[in-house]
Image (cartoon, grey):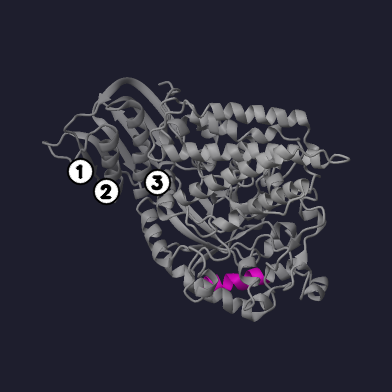
């Protein structure tokens, strides 16, 4: 039997075979549950029932057991030989049979059936699908701490998408106070955090879709939101802050160096552990997951402040490992298995074998050539369970970095599977204001999920097609490729390597008088950028989206393009400022003021459609500062007072 090459399924199953013949779903057919564990397929049957109602306008009843009077359209059949998550689909003259060995397997069979019904309607070709996941844990991590905290309905939308893509783990990254800690109301009283009661709702919504909601609370570095407060400042390794070492930041963006507020705990202060214990006791009871991601990445200050002398005698790596083990003690006392980011311990490979074997290392990296192969091998050889954690490349991008995203996700999947990773976690961050809109991240969600399920079968997955049909329901069939193309504008920048960043985003964040970065972009490159994003803007007009947020999606894509266009004109203004003497165009400055006012107005409106209000003003703060710099420059040219 030849393989079905035209069948549009994502993730692509492990094995798909087709034979001649078509099965027509009867109008009065039933969904039949059979076998000794038949009730375990009831959630899958309910899902299929809803799909049939929405897609083929039938609502087949659920029948427990097969009887002579029953007309079986769909049969769920328990098979104890199938592993967890595995399923088989048979379509022949007898109907559509889904064999499964676990409730998850039945549910994933229903997800595949959804795509078949969307593609074929009531007449489905005879086929055989044998399928199971490559990675046991297939997750998505959303940054809800760098200003943007989604509304519940936004999170429900994302969870539904995860369900369709057969993802089974969701993490909401917490630093600062996006969660309402009951013991520390003063930390979040001016924000709009997620509450414990809302976590309960999300946890239940996830469990209904066989998704594990995993708590994720940074617990070592990235603690600026706490350590900059007077009542917690004494717990910092460097309470007065510090200058980041030269090799850790972009000197074009920060020519005078980069000052960092205190963000890393003092590893030797027992009060730190008391604080963490209280935070954990506020957070963890709302989650049913047995896993807890405690972060512990980018602990820049370890051994640079209070414990400098200790670090010089014992080593920074020893300080890190000792504190990591103290955190694990807190986690184990609360009945959880600890996950931690692996970026620090990987710098001390000699210490990796000393890690407790019951913690899970999260190997992350977001460049297209990140050394997943070498790094995961270190954890494997030491017997430390690990995940691979690539990213969507959406953050600091404005509209994405498509080619980097595809290569990064692919690299992590190939080497993660080869070296025995337990899980594959797609990360979606929000550094420096979380300016990218949600649809920018969808391509990374889709491609990452496809790879997490079946690496080899999805290396060339048709992401654009899935975006067109399953997410945006675009009758024009063009938004998928448009999103991918929009995410490649960065390739027309100067070509200088900027890990996890784009020059247009950096220019919007830099001070107006800083012309170092703009000097790398020629007028010809700016012309090409304007022409490219202009052509993408024209491609928005023919879109014919039928998703329920169609109008919002188009507005968000327009906003992303607006960000890029404004950054290009800002670069032209910086070129004028760099002249000797400066040759400033007063009209261009006024145009930029008006354009930025419009951009900010639209951005604020769009923010509130999917996200909570808290964090918005922090998100736009650098743009507001830029607006002030424009006004000051305009006033200087005219000799008037600054508005």
* Left/right of residue 589 with respect to residue 581 in the rendered view: left
Residue 227: x percent and y percent?
65, 71
Residue 181 lies, with reference to residue 259, above or below; the image says below
The answer to whether marks 2 and 1 mark residues whose Cβ atoms lie closer than 8 Å is yes
The N terminus sits in image quarter: top left
Q: Is residue 417 in sight in this rendering?
A: no
How many residues crowd around disc 1 within 10 Å: few (fewer than 14), some, or many (20 or more)?
A: some
Q: Is residue 73 in sight in this rendering?
A: yes
Which residue is more in the foreground, 105 or 442? 442
Q: Which mark is residue 160?
A: 3
Q: How many marks?
A: 3
Residue 305: x percent and y percent?
77, 72
Marks 3 and 1 sit apart, C-alpha to C-alpha, by 22 Å
How many residues crowd around disc 2 within 10 Å: few (fewer than 14), some, or many (20 or more)?
A: some
Q: Which mark is residue 42?
A: 2
Residue assigned mark 1: 62
């Amino acid at each position: 039997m030849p393989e079905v090459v035209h069948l549009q399924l994502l993730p692509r199953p492990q094995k798909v075979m087709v034979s001649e013949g078509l099965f027509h779903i009867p109008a009065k057919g039933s969904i039949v549950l059979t076998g000794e564990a038949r009730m375990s397929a009831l959630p899958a049957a309910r899902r299929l029932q809803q799909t049939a109602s929405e897609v083929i306008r039938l609502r087949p009843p659920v029948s427990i057991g097969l009887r002579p009077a029953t007309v079986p359209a769909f049969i769920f059949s328990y098979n104890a030989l199938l592993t967890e998550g595995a399923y088989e689909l048979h379509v022949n003259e007898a109907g559509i049979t889904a064999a499964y060995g676990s409730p998850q397997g039945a549910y994933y069979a229903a997800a595949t059936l959804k795509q078949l019904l969307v593609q074929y309607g009531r007449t489905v070709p005879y086929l055989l699908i044998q399928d199971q996941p490559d990675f046991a844990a297939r997750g998505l991590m959303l940054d809800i701490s760098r200003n943007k905290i989604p509304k519940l309905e936004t999170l429900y939308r994302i969870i539904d998408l995860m369900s369709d893509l057969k993802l089974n783990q969701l993490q909401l990254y917490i630093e600062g106070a996006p969660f309402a800690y009951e013991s520390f109301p003063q930390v979040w009283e001016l924000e709009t955090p997620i509450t414990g009661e809302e976590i309960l709702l999300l946890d239940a919504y996830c469990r209904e879709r066989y998704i594990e909601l995993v708590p994720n609370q940074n617990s070592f570095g990235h603690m600026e939101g706490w350590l900059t407060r007077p009542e917690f400042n004494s717990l910092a390794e460097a309470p007065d802050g510090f200058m980041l070492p030269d090799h850790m930041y972009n000197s074009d963006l920060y020519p005078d160096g980069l000052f960092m507020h205190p963000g890393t705990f003092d590893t030797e202060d027992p009060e730190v552990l008391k604080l963490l214990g209280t935070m954990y006791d506020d957070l963890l009871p709302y989650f049913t997951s047995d896993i807890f991601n405690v972060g512990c990445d980018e602990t820049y200050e370890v051994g640079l402040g209070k414990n400098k002398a200790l670090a010089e005698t014992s080593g920074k790596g020893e300080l890190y490992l000792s504190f990591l083990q103290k955190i694990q003690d807190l986690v184990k006392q609360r009945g959880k298995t600890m996950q931690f980011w692996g970026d620090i311990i990987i710098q001390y490979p000699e210490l990796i074998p000393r890690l407790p074997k019951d913690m899970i290392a999260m190997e992350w990296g977001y460049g297209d050539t990140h050394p997943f192969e070498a790094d995961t091998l270190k954890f494997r050889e030491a017997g430390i369970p690990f995940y691979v954690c690539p990213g969507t490349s959406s953050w600091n991008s404005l509209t994405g970095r498509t080619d980097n995203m595809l290569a990064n996700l692919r690299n992590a999947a190939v080497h993660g599977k080869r070296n025995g990773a337990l899980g594959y976690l797609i990360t979606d961050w929000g550094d420096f204001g979380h300016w990218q809109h949600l649809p920018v991240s969808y391509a990374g969600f889709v491609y990452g999920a496809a790879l997490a399920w079946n690496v080899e079968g999805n290396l060339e997955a048709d992401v654009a097609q899935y975006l067109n049909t399953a997410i945006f329901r675009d009758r024009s069939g063009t938004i998928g490729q448009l999103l991918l193309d929009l995410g490649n504008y960065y390739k027309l920048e100067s070509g200088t390597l900027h890990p996890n960043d784009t020059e247009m985003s950096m220019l919007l964040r830099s001070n107006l008088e800083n012309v170092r970065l703009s000097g790398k972009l020629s007028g010809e490159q700016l012309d090409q950028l304007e022409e490219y994003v202009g052509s993408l803007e024209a491609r928005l007009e023919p879109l014919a989206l039928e998703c329920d947020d169609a109008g919002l999606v188009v507005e968000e894509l327009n906003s992303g393009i607006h960000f890029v266009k404004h950054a290009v004109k800002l670069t032209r203004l910086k070129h004028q400022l760099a002249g000797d003497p400066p040759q400033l165009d007063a009209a261009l400055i006024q145009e930029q003021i008006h354009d930025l006012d419009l951009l900010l107005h639209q951005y604020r409106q769009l923010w509130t459609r999917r996200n909570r209000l808290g964090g918005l003003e922090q998100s736009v703060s650098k743009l507001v500062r830029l607006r002030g710099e424009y006004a000051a420059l305009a006033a200087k040219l005219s000799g008037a007072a600054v508005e």
